Image (cartoon, grey):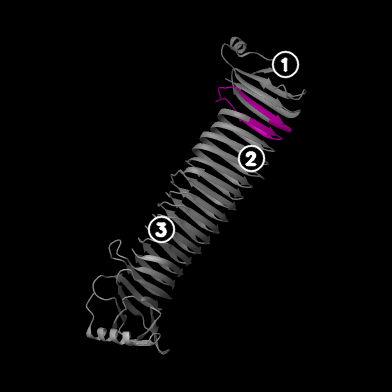
Amino acid sequence: MRPLSIRAAGLLLAILSTPPGAAEVLELPVEWPLGIDSRINLEIDGADLFLTTRTDGLPVLRAETTAGESATLEVVSAGGHLSVRRWDGGEGVVPRLRVEVALGPGRSVKINGRDLDIQAEDKLPAGRGGLGLHLAIEASRAKLTGVQISRLKAVASTVTVAGGSGDLTLDVSGGKTQIQDHEGSLEAKVDGAVVAVIDHRGTIVTGLEGGSLEIVGGDGALTATAFGTELFFDSWHGPVEVQARDSVIEALGTEHRDRWQIKGPDLQVILDRVSGQIGLDLEGGSLDASGLSAALQVSAEAARVDLAESSGSVTLDLQDGTEASIVGLAGRLEAEVSDSRLEIDRVGQLKLSGESADVTALGIETLESLELADSQLALDLRASRRAVSLELRGAGYASVQLKEPCVVQVGVESAPDYQVEATGCELRGPDEQFLPREDRARFGTMPNRLTATVGPDVVLDVQGEP
């Protein structure tokens, strides 16, 4: 920055002697000194603004038109505030302005206007106070580097914030906003805007309607409410609580030990290579998940659930016409199925219960328990090498595949007129009981044993296969 000119020094004396609240009209171009302690308010439309920090000399404002036209600024000093606004007398074409502001440490600027191109950079070392901003802009562009922004309100604007710290309140409608490498709390209201938050460190509280929010990297705690929004996570570390409606929520490559809770109607949830604890409460909508290493809990009504090639534990509560598919789970599945359909292929451990269910379960290594009422069941236990039991009540049909040699033992609490058929396995009634050593002696090895407790209106068909 150049030292103050003689004209600028004269302006400083004039301003210092101007009564509080009085307006000073300055013709452009102008180099105008700013008070040391004043807060600066820039209320300008149609301008290119350049803000920076300095440690040498007095704070200064320089202004001119971009094409050399004549124009004026109005400056008002009142209550420790300096307000700078365009003054054109209401005549002629309004020329575009170029305004440069250089401030000392710890100063703040409030900018209000439309059709602005803003560049602000804090060049001071950390701990030297820094440059603070409060922006309310429309149809504008802003690139803000290292500054402390207390509030940013943007309408149909493109804004990039890099670095900086402190509490930030964001209110954006339309346009695009990117917040990168920020530390502190972030409170964001998003209305139809595209927002990206990259490597943020701290809490995020956001309300979204339309538009999208992308969270990439960073850590903290996030709480969000959303309607008609796309919410995307990539490598975010920290607890998440989302309550949404008619939205898309996607998480990719996020490894953490925290709890995520996502709830709402008509959601499309996509999870890819996510760990931690995840709770989903879906009303309609869908879940498409793969590569998880997580403790997953899903409660779903009239929804679609797909999980593939994952590990960890999964708990499902499926109701009201939900359709679910679980393929390749190297862990434990506990499912409660009511008026819904569940398809399983290759699961380590299974605990299953429900009513009015339609279940197909293939490649089950360990069946902990199975209790169904008024249901349809197709169960493949050829990969199992232990004794298992089924309880089938009400009315329904069940087919079970066992590895030979095998024994089907009808449970003592079964209906007297039970309907159980066995092909390739030895069928035993409730009164036909053998000790394990007797079975070993009869078959030359321990047979695969199925104990089935069935109601009078249940048909059970068991097939033994080599």
The residue that mark 3 highlights is: 184
Q: Do the residues bearing badges 1 and 2 touch, measured as CB atoms within 8 Å?
A: no
Callout 2 amino acid? Arg
Q: Earlier in the sequence, mark 1 or mark 2?
A: 2
Give the main secondary structure, helix, strand or loop, of the magenta stretch: strand
Q: Position of residue 174 (x, y in %)?
A: 48, 67
238 to 166, vertically: above or below: above
Task: Say left or right for 197 vs 209.
Answer: left
For label 2, the residue is: 341
- Circle 1: residue type: Asp
Crowding at dot 2, Cα within 10 Å, few <14 / some 14-19 / many 20+, comes out as many
Classify 310 as above or below 11.
above
- Classify mark 2: helix, strand or loop: strand
Confirm whether residue 338 shows in the render: yes
Q: Taking the image as drawn, is residue 69 in sight? A: no
Q: Is residue 218 left or right of residue 348?
A: left
Q: Per the image, is 334 magenta?
A: no
Q: Which segment did they paint magenta?
A: 370-397
State whether residue 436 is above or below residue 380.
Answer: above
CA gap between label 1 and label 2 equals 35 Å
Nearest to viewer (mark 1 / mark 3) = 3
Give the quadrant of residue 386. Answer: top right
Dot 1 corresponds to which residue? 431
- Mark 1 vs mark 2: give the one in front: 1
> Which structural element holds mark 3?
loop
> Which part of the image, by quadrant, shows the C terminus?
top right
**Which structural element holds mark 1?**
loop
Residue 30, given in percent of the width and then of the height, sits at 29, 83
Rendered location of residue 148, percent (x, y): 37, 65
Q: Quadrant of the N terminus?
A: bottom left
What is the total number of numbered labels drawn onto the structure image? 3
